[in-house]
Amino acid sequence: MKKQIQLVLALAGLLTFGSASALIIDSFDFPADGDLVGIRNGAAFPRLTTTTLDVGDRFIGTSRTLSVTSTTPVSAQSTGELNGLTPDALDMQNSVVAIGTFTVSWDGIDHIDLTENGTILGFQLTIPEAIDNPLIVTFSAGAASVTRTFPNGTQGSGFFIPFGNQDFSDVTRLTASFTGSAGWDAVVQLIGTAPIPGTLLLMGVGLLGLARWGKRAGGQG
């Protein structure tokens, strides 16, 4: 009976562990009549920045800052737009000779635990249009930083960047940077966190059940 109680408690713990819900960091969702937020730079303006304030639940924190940095010393342009070419998305473009970095920073975050006590595995994002060159995405908060490179042609939802052993448990400011070789374009529609997948939860429950059954079968033999 004691072992049965322990098994029930273990299963309950697994269910609790897998019940964490994903947190939306930014849906880039502006009202239909909202103002276009966009910046465009060139060689004469190596870095431009614009900040939007929170008036709802569109993004984590109280303000979002979009920065465009050009690293090419020629007359090249990089642009970043919200609610522009692609509605409800961050649209990033480089001219064919431009190497630029797009940075989104979310400030005024109230010490949020993005890991939800270890039940969240990492960041996920939606890329609704195929990117035309490899895209490097980096998320950082304090000393924690994770990076993933997405190959050209990447398109879809649920793309994953794992936390690994990085500590995103007490976040007051989060930054995402997007960069690549010259001429890359990309659209990001949603950034959030990724919880424990349901398949892993079911696998854990199944393994516990098999272990219990194996012990009982061994005892009967």
Image (spheres, grey):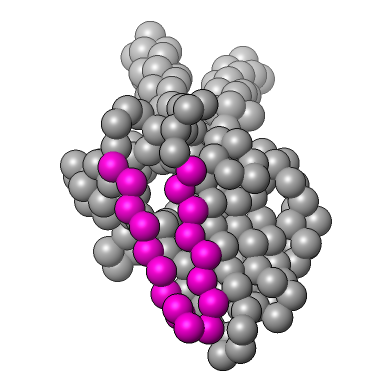
Residue at the (55%, 36%) spot, across then down: 88
Q: Is residue 148 visible?
A: no
- The percent position of residue 27, horizontal first and vertical second, equals 49, 36
- The percent position of residue 75, horizontal first and vertical second, equals 61, 84
The image quadrant of residue 118 is top left
The answer to if 101 sits in the magenta stretch is no
Q: Would residue 142 be found to the left or right of residue 186 on screen?
A: left
Residue at the (60%, 73%) spot, across then down: 77
Q: Is residue 107 visible?
A: yes
The answer to if 52 sits in the magenta stretch is yes
Residues drawn in magenta: 36-53
62 over 71 or under it: above or below: above
Of residues 104 and 77, which is closer to you in this image? 77
Q: Would residue 181 be found to the left or right of residue 38 on screen?
A: right
Residue at the (52%, 65%) spot, across then down: 40
171 over 195 or under it: above or below: below
Q: Quadrant of the C terminus?
A: top right
For the image, the number of numbered tags is 0
The image quadrant of residue 115 is top left
Of residues 163 and 48, which is closer to you in this image? 48
- The percent position of residue 44, horizontal first and vertical second, equals 48, 83
The image quadrant of residue 204 is top right
Q: Would residue 154 be found to the left or right of residue 100 on screen?
A: right
133 over 104 or under it: above or below: below
- The percent position of residue 26, horizontal first and vertical second, equals 44, 40
